[in-house]
Image (cartoon, helix red, strand yellow):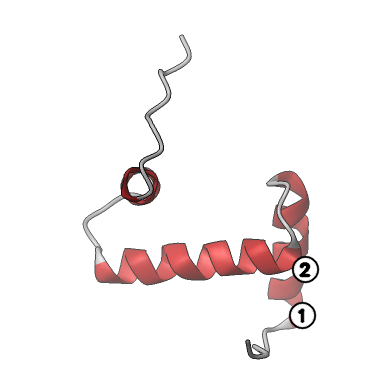
Amino acid sequence: MGIVKIADDLHADVRRASSVMCRSINAQAEFWMKIGMLAEANPTLSFSEIVKMQLEAVQVPPVAPVS
């Protein structure tokens, strides 16, 4: 484990997002880093497609859309 220095305004964004997403601040930052890394590696995929790909990788069944 290491320490990552980020700008104060980005830290505030992470803090706010973590409260909405029910994640710790560290888990929210890690989520954003992982999604960003996957987006750079797969520039043609949307956010939803990346999340779907990750859920399938750990065998989480799809949820039916709300109508």
Give the farthest residue toward the top.
67
Judge left or right: residue 30 versus residue 40: right
Residue drawn at 69 percent across, 69 percent down: 26
In the rendered image, which residue does mark 1 sit on?
8
Residue 58's place in the image compared with 16, above or below, is above
- Which quarter of the picture shows residue 32? bottom right
Q: Amino acid at mark 1?
A: Asp
The CA distance from mark 1 to mark 2 is 6 Å
Report which residue position mark 2 lands on: 12
Q: Secondary structure at mark 1?
A: helix
Q: Which corner quadrant of the image does residue 4 belong to?
A: bottom right
- Residue at (67% x, 84% y) in the render: 6
Q: Quadrant of the N terminus?
A: bottom right
- Please determine whether, in this image, residue 37 is positioned above or below residue 58: below
Does dot 2 land on a helix, a strand or a loop? helix
Label 2, residues with CA under 10 Å away: few <14, some 14-19, many ≥20: few
The image position of residue 18, as x and y in percent, is 72, 55
Asked whether 21 or 59 is in front, the reply is 59
Q: Which mark is residue 39?
A: none
